[in-house]
Image: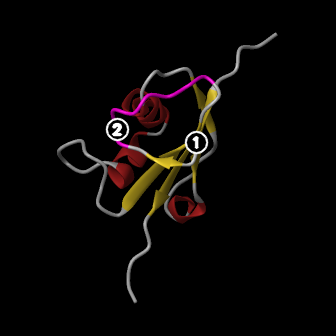
């Protein structure tokens, strides 16, 4: 039986620019999970992180329904949603 793995789901806003399939990871932190995603798709990193390696101002990440920072822990069964924040009025 396969062990449960956390899922990283990139919302459709990013799909306008590049393929963003759902990925599985056993990473312990959000940063490690994202690093794995960027290793599989290097262009994706530039859309999510800025030049200092921080989340871009227009990107938010939720782990199991909670807005999360890069240092946040990830459980084996977590759902990680990466999306571009909407702005304007």
Image quarter of the C terminus: bottom left
On residue 64, the disc is 1
Residue 50, given in percent of the width and then of the height, sits at 24, 51
* Magenta stretch, overall SS: loop
Q: Nearer the viewer, residue 47 or 54?
A: 54
Residue 78, given in percent of the width and then of the height, sits at 60, 33
Residue at horizontal 45%, vertical 62%?
Answer: 84
Residue 63, given in percent of the width and then of the height, sits at 52, 42
- Residue at the outermost left position: 52
Q: What's the distance in space between the residues labelled 1 and 2, CA to CA? A: 14 Å
Task: Kindly state the secondary structure of the residue where label 1 is placed.
Answer: loop
Where 52 sits versus 13, above or below? above
Residue at horizontal 43%, vertical 66%?
Answer: 85
Q: Nearer the viewer, residue 21 or 87?
A: 87
Residue 44, given in percent of the width and then of the height, sits at 43, 47
Mark closer to the chain start, 1 or 2: 1
Residue at horizontal 64%, vertical 42%?
Answer: 22
The residues colored magenta run: 69-76
Tell us which disc is closer to us: 1 or 2: 1
Task: Kindly state the secondary structure of the residue where label 2 is placed.
Answer: loop
Q: Is 22 on the left or on the right of 89, as rendered?
A: right
Where 6 sits versus 10, above or below? above
Q: Label 2: how many residues lie within 10 Å, few (<14), some (14-19) or many (20+)? A: some
Question: How many numbered marks are there?
Answer: 2
On the image, which quarter does residue 31 sit in?
top left
On residue 70, the disc is 2
On residue 5, the disc is none
Image quarter of the N terminus: top right
Q: Is residue 72 highlighted in magenta?
A: yes
């Amino acid at each position: 039986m396969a062990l449960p793995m956390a899922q990283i789901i990139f919302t459709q806003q990013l799909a306008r620019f590049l393929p963003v399939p759902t990925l599985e990871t056993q990473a312990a932190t959000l940063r490690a999970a994202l690093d794995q995603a960027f290793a599989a798709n290097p262009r994706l990193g530039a859309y999510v992180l800025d030049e200092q390696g921080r989340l871009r101002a227009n990107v938010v990440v939720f782990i199991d329904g909670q807005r999360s920072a890069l240092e946040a822990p990830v459980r084996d069964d977590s759902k990680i949603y990466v999306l571009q924040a909407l702005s304007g009025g």
